[in-house]
Amino acid sequence: MPIRPLLEWSARHGGALLAVGIFAGLLSPPVSAALRDVVTPVVASLMTLVLLRVDPAQVLAYLRRPLLVVALLAWILLACPVLAFAVAWVTGMDGPLGAALVIMATGCAATSSPAFARLVGLDGEVSLVVAVLSTLLVPFTAPPLALGLLGIDLAISIGALTGRLVLVVGLPLLLSVIIRRIVPPAALERWGRAVDGAVVLLVVLYGFGIMDGVLARLLASPGFVLGGVALAFGGSFALNAATALAFRPAGRRVALSAGLLSGNRNMALYFAVLPATTDPRILLFFALCQFPLFLSPFLLRPVYRRLRAEA
């Protein structure tokens, strides 16, 4: 089968492929272990393709709306952790899952957010702006929130984060500019759906790598893992809904895109910076947060389609 029709097929069935992919990664421990070390290169490749599919003019247009961008960042990085802490306190979740929920809410928007927004028909441009800027800001917002709310020291290294940003944002930005200069715009447009399909396959590959070791933990502590999955879905969808409602005055498309950003957080950074003394159940919860992230395009796409039709 020629590569282009295959990639276009992947784009058409992206939500289902992501849903199947995360479970395939869970149930294939040897493959997940083999792909664990390719997660960062996959994320860099993913960002390159995402940058080829967003409209640079629209990205700049959002950057010229600083009040909207600042409001989105303040809500996602500051208000959401406080909301999560309030929910954990009111419901009595004072153990590792409660702490993990709050730390999850301090995280920056997932790198895959622009791709997922496009996949479900939402705004990939505002998703890109907020995902990149929230990643730049999270070292300054997450540590004081985690320390003040939970007494947990998130020692996020600015140097290490800068190196990661160069790899997963700077290099893809450079490559996308070079590709746009070499490849005619008509050709990029013609291959657009194929690029979307390649993004889906890269996210599936990322899902395999991030699932390394999760099956063993599921078999060892099924009750905790299933409870963690339920909390991950509850936290993700609750943040999504609360954010969409808060930004409804900005327009339905922006509000829904903001909700998707808020519900899908980048947990990979915390795996690298949390101290060795961190409760392993907190780290496990971060891995379980990948389930709502991967399944949200499949589960929420019909909802977004209906809401857009009503608008």
Image (cartoon, grey):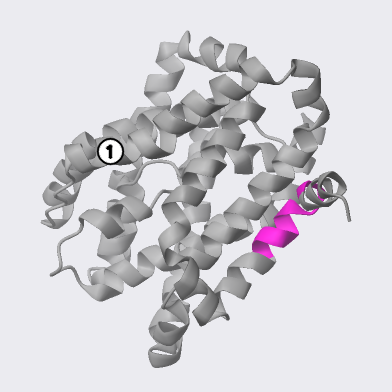
- Look at the image and tell me whether residue 74 can be seen: yes
Q: Nearer the viewer, residue 219 or 233?
A: 219
Q: Give the residue type at disc 1.
A: Gly
User: Chief secondary structure of the magenta span?
Assistant: helix
Q: Which residues are magenta?
A: 11-19
**Residue extending farthest top:** 64
Give 13 or 32, whichever is nearer the viewer. Answer: 32
Of residues 298 and 307, the one nearer the viewer is: 298
Q: Quadrant of the N terminus?
A: bottom right
Q: Residue at x 72, y 48 (%)?
A: 301
Residue at 66% from the left image edge and 59% from the top image edge = 18
Horizontal and vertical percent position of residue 256:
60, 36
User: Which residue is depicted at the point 18% across and 38% down?
Assistant: 159
Report if residue 14 lies within the magenta region: yes
Secondary element type, mark 1? helix
Q: Nearer the viewer, residue 269 or 148?
A: 269
| In the image, residue 288 above or below residue 46 | below
Q: Position of residue 272 (x, y in %)?
A: 26, 56
Q: Is residue 305 left or right of residue 180?
A: right
The image quadrant that residue 52 belongs to is top right
Q: The C terminus appears in which quarter of the rendering?
A: top right
Q: Which residue is mark 1?
A: 163
Image side of residue 265 versus residue 89, left or right: right
Label 1: few (<14), some (14–19) or many (≥20) C-alpha neighbours in 10 Å: few
Residue 252, x across and y down, in percent: 65, 28
